[in-house]
Image (tube, rainbow, N blue to C red):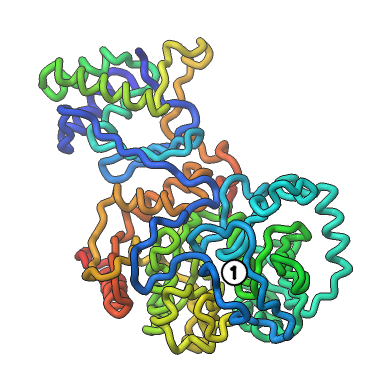
Amino acid sequence: MIPVHAPGVVVAELGDDVVVHDRAGGRFHVLDQTSALVWQCFDGVATVDDIVADIVEVFTTDDGEVRAYVVALVSVLSERGLIVDAAARPAAATDEPEPARPSSASLGPAAAPA
Amino acid sequence: MDRQNRREFLRKGAAAGAIVAGLPLVRSFDVPAFGQAGSPPVPPPSGDVPEGGPVPGQQPGAADLTSSGRHDPGAAVAGEQVAGGSLPFTGGDPKNLAVAGAGAVVLGTVMVGRPRHTVLGHGTDVRTARSLARLDKVFWGFESPPLSVLGFSFRVRHTEAPIGPALLALLAPFRTPEDGPAGPAAPDAGDQPLDLSVRDRGERRDPRFAIYRDGRLLTTAGEPWSALSALFGALDRATVERATARGLVLHAAAAGVGDRVAMLVGPSGSGKTTLTTALVRDGLGYVADEVVAVDADTLRIAPYHKPLTIKPGSHHVFPELRRVGVAAHGATHAHWHVPATSIRRDALAAGGTTGCVIGVEHRAGTASALERLDEADAMSLLVQQCFNGERLDQRGLDTAVRLARDVPCYRLHYSDTDTACALVRRALANVGSGTTA
């Protein structure tokens, strides 16, 4: 799987955490520090295996534990509609991964200047 | 990012203390549909916090506002009443919904089985056009001067002339200055004034009062006070719609000292208005109730000086307002609509910087306490009481994050207003000091 942020999600940093607003699903999600770190790696290019390998190398920790963590996170975020599999999307879409912080200009009436 | 950048990014995370172990922690919470923040919670068993709508079996005649002598003592609120809270919104698409004040009748419920009255949800349809034409022929005993708030203008009409002076006093903070509009309340150029109208349909009609917005029937109400509740509910709704483009709009109240404002956040029935009224009595400036608009760039709170609505459960907290509350006249079951200036002549404050955010929760019989919230809890508090959370874009989300991150956020449990006022003052005094209250 090549995880990538779902289209339309809005993201903001909250200290070490990350807040993700799923406008389509009408929910807010707060990812803790570690989840937020891994979330940022979901760029539509790196596979889960790539990400696990890099984490194991950087954190010099157990491969099985890291894999379990990343797989669990991918599962949770997929279930909540916050990430999708870039490999399963049309080719045109995978050429340009979704940006983590979409422009406010495309986000409807609330984006209008005061 | 390429692999090298990813590793560098991960190294920074490791240095910052991230530990990849155990299970990921992802906290999720629902965003209320537009305008739906503030759904009433399960009411506390007792205490001085009001709970929602009128008391069933209310004493007839006790809320005669108009002094017209035409109040029907037998007329009770018919149909299904809005449950619980003071917030009149019913959620969903604001263009397609009824607006009802607490104690008013939800039209969509009342009219079940009477399809000829299904005026709601169709914009300017044939029926609305007919309604507009019919309203043009109504004799309005009271018509307000031009009014404005948060960038839009409006006017209020009522068929009963005797209510005029009282209604004018309630609406005084919204009056456009004689020398031209200025400041945050000034209407935008080209703004078409909104019409909010209350029509007394006579004592034989049940419910007796009809509330219109731009000619469209929004809701009905059985008593003068509940008609006013519905009227101000319609104003709340319009304010939320118009303020949404300017930043974050929260179901909250606000009072301050100088330029620093405490934002009191919480669902209906949590005691925001009761605490705000107590704070104004205690000397703080009145900034807003029900609707708090936070500027996305400056985090300043704009004034929204609607009358304070004191519900029956809090009447005993403010005995001095018994004869002040419009539409009340001492009635035990009615909402008292109170101009803040009748509590203190200099009560109105011009807004200010968000000094602290306080999640309010009344708990009868327990010790009052103020506790600091972490950023995630503060974010949860804000988003769940955000009228336009559903529509938050990057800018709006960033505004909420800035509030949660940069402004001290607390949760206040209170059982008596004196202690609560002291705790709010303490929270405001701690602004910038880095200490917790």
> Where, by quadrant of the figure, is residue B252 drawn?
bottom left
For label 1, the SS is helix
Residue B431 makes an appearance in the image: no
Q: Position of residue A59 (x, y in %)?
A: 14, 24
Q: Residue B161, relative to residue B194: is it above or below?
A: below
Q: Position of residue B239 (x, y in %)?
A: 60, 61
Q: Residue A15, relative to residue B356: is it above or below?
A: above
Residue B75 makes an appearance in the image: yes
Toward the viewer: B331 or B113?
B113
Mark 1 nearby-residue class (10 Å; few <14, some 14–19, many ≥20): many
Q: Residue shown at 74%/81% (left/top)?
A: B70
Q: Position of residue B225 (x, y in %)?
A: 61, 74
Toward the viewer: A98 or A73?
A73
The mark total stands at 1
Quadrant occupied by the N terminus of chain A: top left
Quadrant occupied by the C terminus of chain A: bottom right
What amino acid is found at the position of numbered circle 1 in the picture?
Answer: Ser
Toward the viewer: B238 or A58?
B238
Kindly identify which chain the residue marked by label 1 belongs to: B
Residue B34 falls left or right of residue B352 = right
Residue B323 falls left or right of residue B158 = left
Q: Position of residue B61 (x, y in %)?
A: 62, 81
Q: Residue A57, relative to residue B350: is it above or below?
A: above
Residue B321 falls left or right of residue B401 = right
Residue B98 falls left or right of residue B331 = right
Q: Residue shown at 73%/78% (left/top)?
A: B145
Q: Residue shown at 39%/70% (left/top)?
A: B49
Q: Dot 1 corresponds to which residue?
A: B229
